[in-house]
Amino acid sequence: MRSRLLTFAAAAAVALAAPAHAVASSPSGGAAVPSEGGAHYGETPKIHGLASLPRLTLFRLSSRTLTATASYRFAGPHTVRDVRVQLLVATGTKVVKTFKLGNREPGTMQNLKVTGTGLPPGRYRVRIRATGLRTAGVSSVAQVTVPAPKPAAPPPAPVPSGDHIFPVRGPFTFGQAGSRFGAKRSGHTHQGQDVAAAEGTPLVAPHAGRVKAVRYQASGAGYYIVIASSGEGRDYAFMHLRAGSTVVAEGQAVRAGQQIGQVGNTGDSQGAHLHFEIWTGGGWYSGGKPVDPLPYLRAWAGL
């Protein structure tokens, strides 16, 4: 009986030891393989986060002054969507112009002509945008300048026409509507034609005559000269002359083309110009009346 009990106990001990032996023989360390989900052996992992976004790998301008060519290139696994090149004010976030380029393929160089047409002179920023776009070591913003337009070449000094000479002997313009005869002024209307020219431009008598007045009016005409034209029944008035430029005196006879002074900016004047008046029917403030000088001036200038 004792022998049979010992045999049973030994068998039980072997049975209990067997599982412990099996665990000890399994590999040790590492995480257990999940039963489902995640990556499987031999499968390419999916790309998530920043790695899946398009990257801007190049962005440059051919010139710092518009017009310029913007060159850019993207990298990424997919088509880059909703690409836009924008012009912004130099300081701030206001977008003043947008070039919508649609979708673009990655990997190829792209070019765009960027112009400042219609924009006032000044400094602007150029940037590139796209859906989900991120940069990769390149700047997406560049500074450019819209230059001021070059002034038009001034017309040449006019030549004498018939027996009259254009009174301004240098480049000139007739200005805009506010420079015309009859333009509204505070409490009165404009009685002459303004001829804009550089200060110091010589002024000459358009026709032979005699100097009727050489005077100064601080609140209006500044330094001015009036010439009674010979044989025409007209008086010619020249106003806003440059201080110290008058070279004739009252009562002096002058010939056509003789210098009498220079263009100035004296009296009630805003910018260098000649205010020119023509009076008929008795003359300047002596029973006559002013007439529009522009048709005369244009004819004398050969326009």
Image: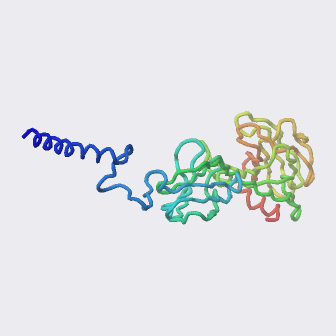
Q: Is 211 placed left or right of 127 in the picture?
A: right
How many numbered discs?
Answer: 0
- Report whether 83 appears left or right of 117: left
Quarter of the image for the C terminus: give it. bottom right
Height in image: 70 above or below 4? below
Please name whichever residue, 219 or 155, is drawn nearer the observer in this view of the structure.
Answer: 155
Quarter of the image with the N terminus in it: top left
User: x%, y% of residue 292?
Assistant: 71, 57
Res. 82 visible in picture: yes
Quadrant in the picture for residue 28: top left
Residue furthest to the left? 1
What residue sits 60% from the left and 55% below the top?
57
Residue 280 in sight here: no
263 in relation to 39, above or below: above
Residue appearing at x 37%, y 47% in the figure: 27
Percent x, y for residue 203?
86, 48
At a point 61% along the width and 48% down the height, the residue shown is: 137
Horizontal and vertical percent position of residue 146:
67, 51
Q: Position of residue 103 (x, y in %)?
A: 51, 65
Of residue 289 and residue 59, the one placed in the foreground of this image is 59
Instruction: State the residue in front, 152 or 171.
Output: 152
Q: Quadrant of residue 71?
A: bottom right
**Residue shown at the point (62%, 45%) measured from the top left:** 185
For this rendering, which residue is in front, 202 or 219? 202
